[in-house]
């Protein structure tokens, strides 16, 4: 099962990296989100199973999950969401100022502005 999870994490990471390497800024943001989600999926799914007795009495101790991995994943989700919103606002600001999302067009516009001044 962990091989299947590792392949899924690898596929998500590869798709995110492939999307990030495009020339469109929106796709760069989407690739960042995919890579973040791949890391969170890896944290949750590949959490090592610990054979410790739970702190609270339960009927079947094998069904109790480790809360540390869940807390780290929740924290990573919140940070990833905040980063995604920030990147989308940056992309929105770039669109409003330069009216394009193409990285090559942005580089050309910046080079022309530098030559003018």
Image: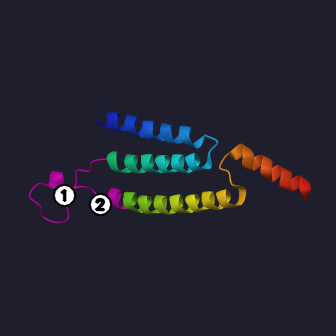
Residue 64: image location, x then y, percent:
20, 56
Report if residue 58 lies within the magenta region: yes
User: Which stretch appears magenta?
Assistant: 46-71
Q: Residues within 10 Å of mark 2 (few under 14, many from 20)?
A: few
Q: Residues within 10 Å of mark 1 (few under 14, many from 20)?
A: few
Question: Does residue 18 lie above or below 69 as drawn?
Answer: above
Of the 4 image quadrants, the one containing the C terminus is bottom right
Residue 21: image location, x then y, percent:
61, 40
Question: Does residue 109 lie above or below 83 as drawn?
Answer: above
Dot label at residue 53: 1
Residue 53: image location, x then y, percent:
19, 57
> Who is closer to the viewer here, 48 or 24?
24
Residue beneath disc 2: 67
At a point 11% along the width and 54% down the height, the residue shown is: 60
Q: CA distance from mark 1 to mark 2?
A: 13 Å
> Who is closer to the viewer here, 100 or 10?
100
Q: Residue furthest front?
A: 99
Q: Nearer the viewer, mark 1 or mark 2?
A: 2
Residue 61 visible in this rendered orientation of the protein: yes
Report if residue 69 lies within the magenta region: yes
> Who is closer to the viewer here, 66 or 100?
100
At a point 67% along the width and 58% down the height, the residue shown is: 94
Say which quarter of the image contains residue 99.
bottom right
Mark nearer the N terminus (1 vs 2): 1
Q: How is the image coloured?
A: rainbow
Residue 49: image location, x then y, percent:
27, 48
Q: Main secondary structure of the magenta part?
A: loop
At a point 57% along the width and 58% down the height, the residue shown is: 87
């Amino acid at each position: 099962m962990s091989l299947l999870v590792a392949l899924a994490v690898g596929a998500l990471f590869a798709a995110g990296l492939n999307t990030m390497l495009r020339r469109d800024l929106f796709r760069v943001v989407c690739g960042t989100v995919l890579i973040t989600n791949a890391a969170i999926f890896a944290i949750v799914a590949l959490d090592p199973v610990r054979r410790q007795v739970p702190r609270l009495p339960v009927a079947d101790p094998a069904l109790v999950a480790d809360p540390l991995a869940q807390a780290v994943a929740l924290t990573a989700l919140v940070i990833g969401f905040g980063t995604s919103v920030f990147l989308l606002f940056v992309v929105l600001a770039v669109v409003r100022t330069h009216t394009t999302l193409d990285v090559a067009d942005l580089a050309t516009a910046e080079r022309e502005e530098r030559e003018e001044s």
